[in-house]
Amino acid sequence: MSLTPRENNMPLLKFESMLKTDSVYFFDSIEFEQIIHYYIDSAKISLAKKAIKLGLTQHPKSVLLKLLQAELMILDGEIQKASNLLKELQAIEPTNEEIYVQQAAIYSKNDNHDKAISLLKIALTYTDDEADILSMIGMEYLYLDDFNEARLNFAKCLEVDFEDYSSLYNIIYCFDMQNKHNEAIDYLNNYINKDPYSEVAWHQLGRQYFIIENYKEALRAFDYAVLIDEFFVGAYLEKAKTLEQLKNFEEAISNYKITIELDDPTSFVFLRIGECYEKLNKSTQAIQFYKKAVHEDPLLDKGWVAITNLNIKEKKYRKALFHINKALEIDELNSKYWRTYAEICLNIDLFEEAENAFKQCLLLKDFDLTIWLGLSDVLCFLGEYEDALKYL
């Protein structure tokens, strides 16, 4: 068991006091385990090593501390040392599941996932925490892209702990990777029949319905999710996206705005709200939220393009030119942006700039007929008739 900064921290304070004063205090092996876990979890590896060194000085035969030493060796890439130490420990405690878990970690690190699975299955026979080992086995099968076996192991985790949402997410991920969305829906409906108040399951069900474009059922599922947990930001977000698909833009905006009230605003949400307002022909509000989007994330090229397109609709071409340049600064390899740039330049008689934009499109292998015709027309405007003919 690891320590937290606020809970049961006396051994940690005592250890750090000892380091500052060069004193030597005695700790039992369990206290050392807690201290070492805390440092590993906090990524303070050098302090973890100091704790292990002192721990093994005071408890030289502690298998528990030697296992932590092996874990640190693996983290440091000292695979052979860790492997040798684990073999020694296996001879001492052949029924200690943690030894097999650490050995599995080594094989997994070397991409030998089949061997890792076989070792974890041995660990499973000795452990009291089946769900943890089953989850590890599931992850190894994921590395092998064996989604059926992965899913079966994560399902066994749910048999041990029905509210293991991490395993539930992984099960649905497996269905997603196999494009088995109807099977995922059946699985989630069965889960909900057993636990109708699981907002996580309702949310996942909504996502599956959304993927197969059954937006009415998706909306129903997201409605249940937010009814069960009124602070479920992800469900409000998915509900808003679903309402957009159903052309209910006013309600979509309301749900996007709820996410802003519940959590820090994101450029994505501002952009979606802007697009909803634009679809409602409310250009003033749309521009306001597009500007909020690029203020939140100045590198959001889609935000700059959204403003550009509204500028073009309103024939504000100078403003449009400024905003499309912002998008091109972020993604100069996007031929669609160069097309828009060319369109704007043509409207304000910047023919040489338009010529360059069309040529950029061709360099980016955008060979649409409109590019060839546009470039040819521009060259004619510039009086370069022979060059214009080359592009026809």
Image: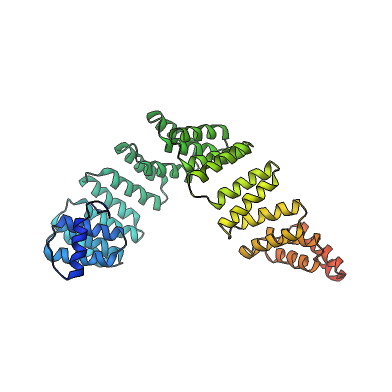
Q: What is the x, y in percent for residue 43?
A: 32, 62
Q: Is residue 209 visible?
A: yes
Q: Quadrant of residue 291?
A: bottom right
- What residue is drawn where x is 37% and y is 43%? 167
Residue 289 to residue 204: above or below: below
Which quarter of the figure is the C terminus placed in? bottom right
209 horizontally vs 51: left or right: right
Q: Nearer the viewer, residue 193 or 330?
A: 330
How many labels sit on residues? 0
Q: What is the x, y in percent for residue 53?
A: 18, 67
Q: Is residue 90 visible?
A: no
- What residue is drawn where x is 85% and y is 69%? 382
Q: What is the x, y in percent for residue 358?
A: 75, 64
386 horizontally vs 210: left or right: right
Q: Nearer the viewer, residue 351 or 278?
A: 278
The image's colour scheme reads rainbow
Residue 95 to residue 185: above or below: below
Furthest-top residue in view?
A: 193
Residue 338 to residue 145: above or below: below
Q: What is the x, y in percent for residue 247?
A: 64, 37
